[in-house]
Image (tube, rainbow, N blue to C red):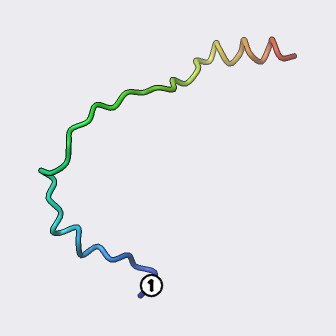
């Protein structure tokens, strides 16, 4: 029984109490060109 989490409270959860948030990506992945430039400058 311990391997299954207790999800009984989820059925009583009120989504309307949640605040709306704006997500902003802070850490943008480098492009393929940037990766190639870094590889060349390291060697």
Residue lying at the far bottom in this picture: please name it: 1
Residue shown at the point (28%, 31%) measured from the top left: 22
Which quarter of the figure has residue 10? bottom left
- Whether residue 35 is situated above or below residue 10 in the rendered picture: above
- Whether residue 31 is situated above or below residue 9 in the rendered picture: above
- Whether residue 26 is situated above or below residue 16 in the rendered picture: above
Front residue (pair 18, 10):
18
Q: Position of residue 8 (x, y in %)?
A: 24, 76
- Whether residue 8 is situated above or below residue 31 in the rendered picture: below
Q: Position of residue 4 (x, y in %)?
A: 40, 79
Residue shown at the point (55%, 24%) measured from the top left: 29
Which quarter of the figure has residue 36? top right
Residue under label 1, please give it: 2
Which quarter of the figure has residue 5? bottom left
Q: Position of residue 9 (x, y in %)?
A: 23, 72
* The N terminus sits in image quarter: bottom left
Front residue (pair 41, 8):
8
Residue shown at the point (80%, 13%) measured from the top left: 40
Residue shown at the point (87%, 16%) measured from the top left: 43
User: Is 2 placed left or right of 29 in the picture?
Assistant: left
Secondary-structure class at tag 1 = loop
User: Is 27 placed left or right of 11 in the picture?
Assistant: right
Front residue (pair 29, 21):
21
How many discs mark residues in the rendered view? 1
Residue lying at the far right in this picture: please name it: 43
Circle 1 crowding by C-alpha within 10 Å: few under 14, some 14–19, many from 20: few
User: Is 8 placed left or right of 36 in the picture?
Assistant: left
């Amino acid at each position: 029984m311990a391997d299954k989490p207790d999800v009984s409270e989820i059925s009583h959860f009120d989504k309307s109490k949640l605040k709306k948030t704006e997500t902003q990506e802070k850490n943008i992945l480098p492009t393929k060109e940037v990766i190639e430039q870094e590889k060349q400058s390291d060697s």
